Every structure is written in structure tokens, then in C-alpha cells.
Image (spheres, rainbow, N blue to C red):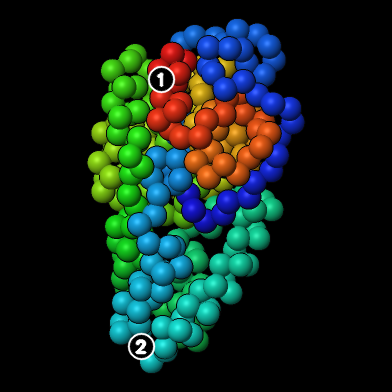
Amino acid sequence: MWESQTTILGVGNKPNSLKETTRTGRPMPRPAKVIFFDLGETLVTQNIEDNMVTRNALREISPILPKRVSPERMFELYQEGYKINETLRSRHHIEIPIQVWMRQLLERIIEDSPSDQLVKAAIEIIVKARSANGVAFDDAHSTMQKLSRRDVKLGIISNVSSHEVAMGILDKARLTKYFDEIVTSARVGIRKPDPGIFRYALMQFKARPEEAVMVGDSETHDIGGGYISGLRTVLVDRRHRVANSLADYHFNSLGDASRDIEFL
């Protein structure tokens, strides 16, 4: 999702058309059994900047606290905790679910152990705010509609600390109906680019790596993770951030890629 975006450059120029060859120079095997998509910045984007969404949610949480703490101080504590958790996630590719980091945050805010009821209420506020903030890219629906007419399974593999946020975003964007499986790091406990989450996703479809494709915007998480897991990879580089990608195929939008993805 949007929790971390680190870009690395791959090696060598890659072909732009799926009608060409794979990175090994061999003809592209056809057809794919399953196509996986990243969620944030691949299918959907944010309506409001993430920090603003979090600030607004913390303001809503503030009145239900057992002691008075300013929203500004709450956000400072949130940022401090986020930096620590992000270091752990990035180094070890583990997910810290919302149930864990929210309890940690509330303990620091109220300087006491929060009740289960307070943790639950705070999580619901965050989930609602973040779910409402997702909006589908213009090319998302048309691409999914084309693919849904094919005999191919579609799945999501997303780094997100709350499975409910991912589901809420998909529901709001009216994209849920296109996908057979929604795999999130919140449920699996492992984050992209670790091969574990890709292998788990493949298991849901009883598919081998060579029968699957990963489509995403992150050179590190989607392309790097897909590559080392043995999947074919398609980079959707909407922000033109990657000059030389490790991906098999490199496009500037999902719309640009959609015609060729149909023939995977």
C-alpha cells in the first residue's frame, strides 16, 4: 500500500511489449493461470495525503480517551512509533498489524494500559478513515473488466497493516467483485518483497510461480519480490520513477499495459 515506497534500479533495459520475450530471452509462456495486482498506487490512489487522514482520525479518537491529550501530541507519538515499526518491517519483511501498533500507541498516549474497548473503537476510526480515502485510478475498472472476461484468476497481494482497510478500499472503489483472493500482509504476517507472501498467494490458487504474473508500482516490493519468487513481473510506473527496471515489462500506466496484459 502506501506505508513505504523504496525504489531501486534494476539492470538493463527491458522490452515494453508483452509480445516480445521474457528477461531470459525465452518466449512468454501462455496463458497465465493467475494475475496478481498490488493495490495502492497500482489500482487505487489516495484522495487525501495519508498524514492528513491520520491526523483527522486521531482528532476523532481524542474525545474517547480517558485523559485529555491534544491531537497534535497524539500525532507526534504516532510518528515516533511509526518510524520504529517501519524499520522493523523494512528490515525483516514482517507485518505489525493494526491491533498491535494501535495498542502500543494508546499506551504511550494515555500512559496506561488501554482497555480492549478503547483499542477496538480507535481501530474502527482508523479503518473507516483510511478505507474512505482510497479512489480507483481511471484505468482500473476498464482493465479489470477486460481481464474478468478471460479464463484467468485475479488476486491482490498488498502490504497493509489492516486487512479491513484493504477490503474497505476495494469496496469503496467497487473493485472487490473482480478478485478471487485478497492476500494482505496483515493476514499473512509477511510483507513484500519476502517470497513467503507470494508463495502463500500462489497456494490459494494451487498455481506454480511460472503460471503467475505480478503487476505493481513498486520496484522493490512488487517487481523485486515477484522476480525472486519466480513470477513474471509488470511494472506500472505512473510517476516515472524507474529508469531501468528489473521487471519483465515496464509501462507508465495500467491503461497502457492493459491490452498486452490480456494476452498473458
Label 2 crowd bin: few (<14), some (14–19), many (20+), radius 10 Å: few
Crowding near the residue tagged with mark 1, few <14, some 14–19, many ≥20 C-alpha atoms within 10 Å: some
Q: In this view of the protein, can residue 89 be seen by the observer?
A: yes
Query: Which dot, 2 or 1, sits closer to the camera?
Result: 1
Q: Quadrant of residue 156?
A: top left
Q: Amino acid at mark 1?
A: Arg
Residue that label 2 marks: 66
Q: Which mark is residue 75?
A: none
Task: Give the x, y percent position of residue 35.
Answer: 45, 25
Which residue is located at x 49 percent, y 64 percent? 100
> Dot 1 lies on which element?
helix
Q: Is residue 259 above or below residue 118?
A: above
**The quadrant where residue 227 appears:** top right
Q: Residue at x 53, y 79 (%)?
A: 77
Q: Nearer the viewer, residue 95 or 19?
A: 19
Residue 101: percent from the left, percent from the top?
A: 50, 66
Which residue type carries mark 2? Pro
Q: Give the numbered dot on residue 259.
A: 1
Q: Position of residue 130 (x, y in %)?
A: 36, 59
Q: Secondary structure at mark 2?
A: loop
